[in-house]
Image (cartoon, coloured by chain):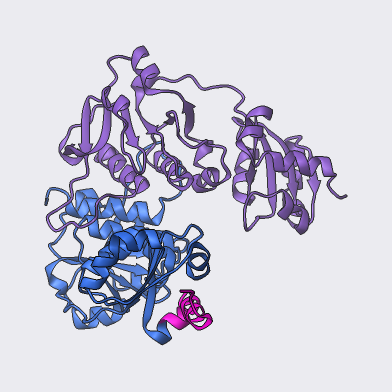
Chain colours: A purple, B blue
Amino acid sequence: MALSKNTIKTLTALHRKKFRQKYNNFIAEGDKIVGELIRQRHYPVQEVFALPAWLEVNEPLLQENSIPFSTINDAELRLISQLTSPNQVLAVVGQPLEEKTVDWSDNWSLYLDGLQDPGNVGTILRIADWFAIPRVIAGPGTVELFNAKVLQATMGAFLRVQWITQSLSAIRSNHPTLPIWAADMAGEDIFKLEAPKAGILVIGNEGQGVSEQVKAMVDQQVAIIAPHGSGAESLNAGVATGILCAALRRGRA
Amino acid sequence: MALSKNTIKTLTALHRKKFRQKYNNFIAEGDKIVGELIRQRHYPVQEVFALPAWLEVNEPLLQENSIPFSTINDAELRLISQLTSPNQVLAVVGQPLEEKTVDWSDNWSLYLDGLQDPGNVGTILRIADWFAIPRVIAGPGTVELFNAKVLQATMGAFLRVQWITQSLSAIRSNHPTLPIWAADMAGEDIFKLEAPKAGILVIGNEGQGVSEQVKAMVDQQVAIIAPHGSGAESLNAGVATGILCAALRRGRA
């Protein structure tokens, strides 16, 4: 059964942020992520579009979960996919069924201060997942989670790490005693600091670093100290986040 | 003066590994990297192709260094560039003038065991540069340094970090006492080990990890321990390398 022109139009509209926000849903792609989405309960899977080979294996899973699906061919998959190399299956997914309550004082959170690169943002979610950091906050100007490249780079971490869109000033005014740390070249060596149990670690924009507005709220600037002989001007935002999270978690496994 | 068909053909041939190896040179792009290349002495800059706006500022620098150049227009730049968004200037660069002698016992080296992703490899050179690790060894199957995406991702680090193409068994047979560490899920917590002054840290392929052949030569397997509650199956190879290098350098700034 061929996809109708209307279905194709609706699906390709979801490639754009504007329509994802209008319809309140997004597209997830690939065998691994779609499989994980169907097995979890946080995001509702509304419909699945898949090649016959994928359905041969996974049709029982779809039926158990009462998820409607359509069989498509390679040409149709290429039409509706957001990827240059589409992978068998694509799902239309709704926004989370209920927002988890947030206990800011139970653990660290990451705050992204206007991060623009989808690969970096996805990688940072994967890092949070690895280091059991329960949430990532997208500050103003940060790329949207449901961007196809962000989702892809998370390698499924978006299913486990909560994504919150909020400004730092809103969090600070509700939780005035929560420690706020920020990555800054001029900060103290994070490996020499004793990290509190909970707090917010701010990651600055790739080019500009932490904004002045956010800096004014920071309690502790932290740095990854470059040894003598270092040449690079900076580390990639994802790599820096990985090192900072490792330092926060050191010896707490 | 328009570029000749022959020049365009020669330049676009350098987009391919085969011709880079045949002619023993490569293309570097962008204002920052080309500027740095002209100011250093390790790589010979053979010719520069640039937009009039770039030459207006940089022509004296080219003349001081006796580097031939051609003025090109936007359309020509798009034709000869390897980038989707070309940036003003492009240089044809030769292989290093002389190989630095390698003292394996003076410091750590990174060994890439078949790394395939150009972004990861470039990021790893940038990490080595930041942590003053003087060299990166490309084992068999690793993507070539002079790939445009690798060079771009190094952010200029390739000018300071030595790139060596060699197999681990060749290094080991010449330096049998040099410690070899490798990243492995089942390894010991790297933050709990005392690192020797020098050694080789092996980074495995993105999907397969460290190959069996290389594993047989490893003295110490090291891991980035995931805390309780961790969800991700792995970290990105660049992020993992950053954390391992930070652990090696901790407290030695």
Q: Choose between A228 and B241: the one closer to the eye.
A: A228
Is B171 on the left or on the right of A236, as rendered? left
**Range of magenta residues:** B1-20
Is B211 on the left or on the right of A196, as rendered? right
Q: Is residue B180 among what the camera can see?
A: no
Is A188 a magenta residue? no
Q: Choose between A12 and B67: the one closer to the eye.
A: B67
Is B15 a magenta residue? yes
The image quarter in which residue B69 lies:
bottom left
Q: Choose between A27 and B52: the one closer to the eye.
A: B52
Residue A17 lies, in percent from the top left, at: 60, 36
Seen as rendered, the residue at the extreme bottom is: B22
Q: Residue at x 27, y 22 (%)?
A: A217
Magenta residues: mostly which secondary structure? helix
The image quarter in which residue A195 lies:
top left
The image quarter in which residue B157 lies:
bottom left
Residue A15 lies, in percent from the top left, at: 65, 42
Q: Residue at x 41, y 66 (%)?
A: B115
Q: Residue at x 66, y 33 (%)?
A: A19
Above/below status of A54 relative to A194: below
Q: Is residue B21 among what the camera can see?
A: yes
Residue A65 lies, in percent from the top left, at: 72, 35
Q: Residue at x 27, y 77 (%)?
A: B44
Residue A200 lies, in percent from the top left, at: 32, 27
Seen as rendered, the residue at the extreme front is: B1
Seen as rendered, the residue at the extreme right is: A1
Q: How many marks?
A: 0
